[in-house]
Amino acid sequence: MRFMRLAAVAALATVSFTAQAHGPTRQKISESVEIDAPADKVWAVVGNFQDGSWIPVVEKTEGKGGNEPKATRTLTLKGGATVEEELAKYDADKKALMYRINKVDVKTLPVNDYSSNIEVEAEGANKTKVTWRGAFYRGYMNNDPPPDLNDEASKKAVQGLYRAGLDNLKAKVEKGS
Amino acid sequence: MNLIGRMRPVGGRLRAGLLALSRARLPSPLCGGGWAGRQAGSVGTKSRREGRDILRLVLALALLAALPHPARAAEALVTVQGDNAVEVVDLDAAKVVRRIPVSGSPAGIALSPGRDTAYVTRPDLPGLAVIDLRTDTVTQDLKLPGGPLGIGVDPRAGTVYVADWYAARVLVLRPEGGKLVADGEIAVGQSPSGLAVTPDGATLLVANREADSVSVVDIAARREVARVPVGKHPFGLTLDAEGKRAYTANVTGDDVSVIDVPARREVGRVKTGERPYVVALAGGRGFVTDQYGNSVTAFDLATLKSVGTIDVGDHPEGIGAARDGRHLYVANWGSNTLSVIDAGTLKVVREIPTGDGPRAFGDFLR
């Protein structure tokens, strides 16, 4: 399983990824969820950088450095694809973290220069809002991208990932597991 | 992907676009002065007293015109990429007062020598918009080849230079009869991004992101005459007021290169936060936006030592110093705000909300 489904893998065969420059227009996605649980309980799940299991497609998390900036993790997805990530900022008091993708195949997630913020805010004793924001360039790094690697495709893939992740987080935490 | 092979048909499109748009009329540049001229012309039929009043008025207008800056509110012209617009921010009122729709994910911006016309790059069109800032209208809609992003204007001749991010060239656009006309291109290094022209109009400097260098272009000869090696992936390029020193923000090197322009060599390096974007200069200091650090690094221009880090919004990009040199304005792409920094105290004194994805890459304050 992948973060996204490719409709036309064949189109990729003719595409070269040797160019270094990314597209000129960085994209952003922001998704949030309200969870009926205390913020500490939610943060205990999403604030553990070494366990990405709350994201449905993640099968295994291996990493080092705990929750310190520059900690790394490799997410192995169902189906075998991997995503290498690095923690950039971690603020336990504010319940916020920022991480980056260091390495991912655009066939797994069609993005470049991806960075992301997760913020957990208490909205009451038993109500918490989680916001997941991402900034990234599209999968194809040159002009005239194929449809599966254009701005729209990259935004759709990230949005789908965030939605599935946050909805699963809500279900998981509210169930108490 | 063969960019070169596609240049010719795209150039044809450019010419076709220019032809199609040549019908759109620019407001007459004489509109402002025409009234006084007509009045003065009728003096002979009026009383001497009226004539003296008119003479005084004409002199007053002439004096106004001679002032270095017109008496208008200080403004920021912010490209809000996600909203496909340029927003006019009144810096005293600290709010967006007008919005001009510009399609194609507007990013880069530069101003005409008279500072009454804005040139805005549209990487997703791809093309350029000419905006008359007296009427807030797009007066020319140019299609351009490649990935137009960085843009700069010759402060003397008014020639507009547009960097093609996907190639290794700068497109030249010449003002003629109130319009910009395509006037060829100049070869530079790979993925040109930030660029600037020296105050004497003699030299164009171009940061070549993928070539880790700055191209020195002789404007009269229309060709690159030197290439200065700098840090890794220079993006924004900023010239000082005298045109003696240039500063590049080296995105993956996390530093700034300082270039001695006449000597055509790098003379210093300043450490910054993560992923520096572009430098602004004010009060003997340089200010660099750190995209990943969500901060601005300030450094002393004489010692090239850091003097502080200022927390700003998410993914800060464009930064500029106000006319008075007392404040800096930072476009925070992620948080949709302008942070206002006091250049003396190095504190953020205000946040101004903007539309989605402010970039303001270039000369955006007037």
Image: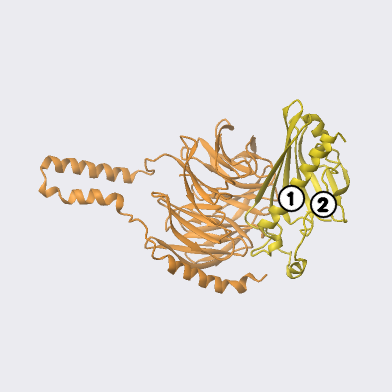
Among numbered discs 1 and 2, the one appearing first in the sequence: 2
User: Mark number for residue A83?
Assistant: 2
Q: Residues within 10 Å of mark 1 (few under 14, many from 20)?
A: some
Mark nearer the viewer, 1 or 2: 1
The residue at the point 56 percent across, 61 percent down is B126
Q: Is residue A67 visible?
A: no
Given the image, on which type of amino acid does mark 1 rest?
Answer: Gly
Secondary structure, mark 1, is helix
Quadrant including the N terminus of chain A: bottom right
Left or right for B169, reference A167: left
Secondary structure, mark 2, is strand
Disc 1 target residue: A160
Residue A100 percent coordinates (x, y): 76, 47
Name which quarter of the figure residue B10 lies in: bottom right
Q: Residues within 10 Å of mark 2 (few under 14, many from 20)?
A: some
Left or right for B87, reference A124: left
Given the image, on which type of amino acid does mark 2 rest?
Answer: Val
Name which quarter of the figure residue A117 lies in: top right
Chain identity of mark 2:
A
Q: Which chain is orange?
A: B
Left or right for A78, reference A164: right
Q: Which chain is yellow?
A: A
